[in-house]
Image (cartoon, grey):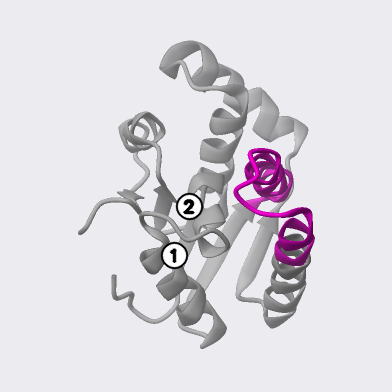
Amino acid sequence: MKSERNNRFFLDTSAFFKEYHDEEGSVFVHEIFEQTKHGEAVICISLLTISEVLNALDKIRKRRIISDYECRIIAEGILSDIVELTKTGRFEIHDVTAAIIRASWDLILTNHLSAIDAIQVVTAQGSGADLFLAADRYLLSQASDICLRTWNVEENL
């Protein structure tokens, strides 16, 4: 995926995690991170994404896909990357506010999204992102229905 200079990408946890755990779609997320490091893109995430990605990392550790040591090293890398990229102004962490939580309720009841997914979608709407990226077809279809441009990182463009 080739982006134009200064594109803003909102990464759901399912997309963000692919930067740190190679799986289907990782190559596209790696490219977005590289573009961000070179000042050609901005990555936006919800504050919740950090907890969710650490939880996903812990789950693969518990399933013994990675060792305790590997888990600790990857977690340190994730947090270090977040700190470094945030300093450049090319990585934005959007707080979860009471207004975001209240706005998510309608998506939960109307679009049948989980609370976390609804919060991610509302946060993406407010982030000014050009594209909402995830690896969850249902989430992407619901985000698209409310007028977000979406892309499934596990599918080719």
Q: Is residue 110 above or below residue 97?
A: above
Q: Is residue 149 left or right of residue 7?
A: left
Asked if the residue under mark 1 is in contact with the one under mark 2, i.e. CB atoms within 8 Å, the reply is yes
Q: Is residue 111 left or right of residue 53?
A: left
Secondary structure state at the residue bearing disc 2: helix
Q: Which residue is mark 2?
A: 15
Q: CA distance from mark 2 to mark 1?
A: 7 Å
Kindly identify the residue that appears in the image at 75 percent across and 38 percent down.
97
| Res. 128 visible in picture | no
| The C terminus: image quadrant | bottom left
Crowding at dot 1, Cα within 10 Å, few <14 / some 14-19 / many 20+, comes out as: many
The tag on residue 68 is none
The amino acid marked with disc number 1 is Val
The tag on residue 29 is 1
Residue 116 placement (x, y as % from top left): 61, 30
Q: Is residue 113 left or right of residue 72?
A: left
Q: Is residue 112 above or below residue 56?
A: above
Residue 46 placement (x, y as % from top left): 65, 48
Magenta span of residues: 46-74
Residue 110 placement (x, y as % from top left): 45, 13
Secondary structure state at the residue bearing disc 1: helix
The amino acid marked with disc number 2 is Ala
Magenta highlight on residue 71: yes
Kindly identify the residue that appears in the image at 61 percent across and 24 percent down.
115
Of 125 and 3, the residue lying toward us = 3
Q: Is residue 35 above or below residue 78?
A: below
State which tag comes first along the sequence, 2 or 1.
2
Judged by its main secondary structure, the magenta piece is helix
